Image: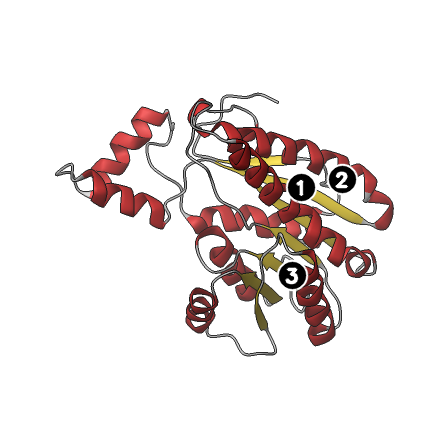
Amino acid sequence: MDLGLADRTIVVTGGSSGVGLATVRALLDEGARVATCGRDADRLAKAAAGLGAGSDRLLTGVCDVRDADAVRDFTARTADAFGGIDGLVNNAGQSRMKGLDDSTADDWRDELELKFAGVLNPLQAARPHLAASGAAGVVNINAVLAKQPETRLITTSAARAGILNLSKSLSVELAGDGIRVNSVCLGLVDTGQWTRRHAAADSGLTYEEWQAELAEDRGIALGRLGRAEEVAYAVVALLSPRASYITGTSIDVCGGVGRSIL
């Protein structure tokens, strides 16, 4: 099926690795033009080199999404280079493995700033271009933590719940501009952090065996971690003009770990 993304311009934040990089690759495969940013210049350059796309299809920039001025500059450069912006994937972010007693006031402040700035700064910069698109979509990468919090990730769970709430509000506020806003909520995805944790555990298990035990412990119905490209598929589908009547919703990509019915 042609998703209608050929020659459309999509901005993906946090595209140096993991879900962000997989999304960039999937969009390029669909014929889209992609602009992506990250905080680490070396990682970003390495990721871009592995994609094999020319400057007419891929633009990169070093940018911290908490820096509104830097985000505006990156967005303006994208619009100038590609003639507009049709979609935005707010992916930049991280999890903070801390419980209540370990979380300082700075932890709470930093977590909330990163999560909210990571959505609002790129959206505010891209909004005029998205409104002019005629087929604009925004996808906020979130987590099932937003719906079923974990106390060992208390600041991240709270911030992600706020972003899910914000996404619903944005879907209403921006509908008049023709901008759809949806969320993709992740479970455990097989990224570099899990291979590092396997190595540090020194359990004597193969990675596949260790992953299966982890999945059982976390209650993942499919018995394994997800893959970044499986998340990217959902993101690209929501960005597609074929999803033109889908807004204000969230899709769980979590292997069945989600227990919420809402």
Query: Circle 2 sits in a helix, a strand or a loop, which is it?
Result: helix
**Which residue is rendered at x = 72% and y = 34% of the image?**
168
Dot 3 surroundings within 10 Å: few (below 14), some, or many (20 or more)? many
Could you tell me the amino acid type at mark 2?
Answer: Ser
Vertical order, 139 against 187 (above or below): below
Q: Which residue is mark 2?
A: 171
Q: Secondary structure at mark 1?
A: strand
Tell me whether the residue at label 1 lies in contact with that at label 2, contact meaning CB atoms closer than 8 angstroms.
yes
Task: Determine whether, in the image, residue 128 is placed left or right of residue 104.
Answer: right
Q: Residue furthest left?
A: 204
Q: Residue 22 appears at what percent x and percent y?
A: 47, 56
Place of residue 75 in the rendered image (x, y in percent of width and height, measured from the top left):
69, 64
Neighbourhood count class around disc 2 (C-alpha, 10 Å): few under 14, some 14–19, many 20 upward: many
Identified by mark 3, the residue type is Ile
Which residue position is annotated with label 1?
Answer: 182
- Image height of 58 relative to 111, above or below: below
Is label 3 in a helix, a strand or a loop? strand
Q: Is residue 258 visible?
A: yes
Q: Distance between the Cα atoms at labels 1 and 2? A: 7 Å
**Residue 194 left/right relative to 125:** left
For the residues marked 3 and 2, what is the alpha-carbon distance in whole angstroms? 18 Å
Label of residue 10 in the image: 3
Q: Earlier in the sequence, mark 1 or mark 3?
A: 3
Residue type at mark 1? Asn
Residue lying at 56% horizontally and 41% vertically, measured from the top left: 110
| Mark 3 vs 2: CB contact within 8 A | no
Comparing 130 with 95, the one in front is 95
